[in-house]
Image: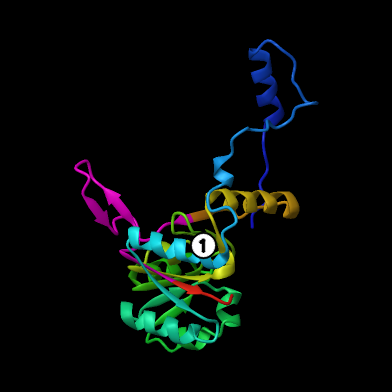
């Protein structure tokens, strides 16, 4: 993850205070306590099982197919999904989770597949452009909108989820949260406790959907034509 640096913050804030005709206020400033916080109430208290059902229902709205599986059956489930969508070429993250879930043999057995490498971005991007399938994990999953959240990091190229015709997202059920509110809280926690956040955070809700001025839905113009989620219920 990239460490950011803020430039000219003090001069910028001092200029605003000057335009308001007062001195800078640097003490005694508190965040307001809002009387109503509906963002915290959506699906409050929902279990992971309940959030999973909410996610699956939402996927029906965003044109995304879903499989559920267990850790032991995940290699078989992924293999079936790969066969369903055309197998190869396939590109996937260089991510420890592929190793820990025993998915390397499944992907390496394909006629043509490659794990993302940061050493030759141009070559990898060209491969991703002609890949049939891109496979990633979801770092946080928003039940309300059917959204997978992907954190950038070495080995986790954005092209893997953007350029192939099909995006397969592997979703450990433990990553499920109600909505964007909790994802933002986690990112703020990372900044506060770890001192850094991912240089890019992608919120992806199903396949690429666009609409023209006549409100006709166009799929796949700015990304994958199809999206498929695999929920790992015991992870």
Q: Residues in magenta?
A: 203-229
Percent of width and height locating residue 21: 68, 10
The answer to whether 23 appears left or right of 41 in the picture is right
Percent of width and height locating residue 205: 41, 57
The residue identified by callout 1 is 51
Residue furthest to the right: 27
Residue 208's quadrant in the figure?
A: bottom left
The correct choice, above or below, for 192 with respect to 13 in the image is below
* SS type, badge 1: helix
The answer to whether 19 appears left or right of 110 in the picture is right
The correct choice, above or below, for 66 with respect to 78 in the image is above
- Residue 46 magenta: no
Percent of width and height locating residue 59: 38, 62
Q: Is residue 29 visible?
A: yes
Q: Which residue is at a point 56% across and 65% down the rendered structure image?
A: 48
The answer to whether 60 appears left or right of 27 in the picture is left
* Quadrant of image for the N terminus: bottom right
Residue 99's quadrant in the figure?
A: bottom right
Residue furthest to the top: 21
* Quadrant of image for the C terminus: bottom right
Q: Which residue is at a point 37% across and 87% down the rendered structure image?
A: 111
Q: Is residue 159 visible?
A: no
Q: Which residue is at a point 71% across and 12% down the rendered structure image?
A: 22
The answer to whether 92 appears left or right of 32 in the picture is left
- Residue 228 magenta: yes
Q: Which is more toward the observer, 130 or 137?
A: 137
Give neighbour class at mark 1: few <14, some 14-19, many 20+ (Cα, 10 Å): many
Q: Which residue is at a point 49% across and 66% down the rendered structure image?
A: 52
């Amino acid at each position: 993850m990239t460490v950011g640096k803020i430039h000219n913050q003090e001069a910028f804030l001092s200029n605003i205070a000057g335009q308001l005709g007062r001195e800078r206020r640097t003490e005694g400033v508190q965040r307001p306590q809002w009387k109503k916080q509906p963002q915290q109430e959506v699906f409050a208290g929902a279990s992971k099982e309940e959030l999973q059902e909410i996610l699956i229902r939402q996927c029906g709205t965003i044109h995304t197919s879903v499989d559920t599986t267990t850790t032991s059956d995940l290699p078989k489930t992924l293999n079936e999904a790969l066969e369903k969508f055309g197998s190869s070429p396939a590109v996937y993250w260089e991510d420890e989770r592929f190793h820990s879930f025993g998915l390397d043999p499944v992907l390496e057995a394909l006629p043509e597949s490659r794990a993302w490498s940061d050493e030759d971005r141009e070559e990898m991007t060209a491969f991703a452009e002609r890949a049939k399938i891109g496979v990633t994990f979801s770092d946080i999953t928003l039940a309300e909108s059917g959204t997978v959240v992907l954190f950038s990091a070495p080995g986790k190229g954005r092209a893997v989820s953007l350029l192939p015709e099909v995006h397969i997202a592997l979703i450990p059920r433990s990553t499920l949260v109600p909505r964007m509110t909790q994802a933002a809280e986690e990112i703020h926690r990372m900044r506060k406790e770890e001192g850094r956040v991912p240089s890019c955070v992608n919120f992806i809700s199903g396949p690429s959907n666009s609409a023209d001025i006549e409100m006709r839905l166009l799929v796949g113009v700015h990304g994958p034509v199809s999206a498929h989620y695999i929920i790992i219920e015991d992870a």
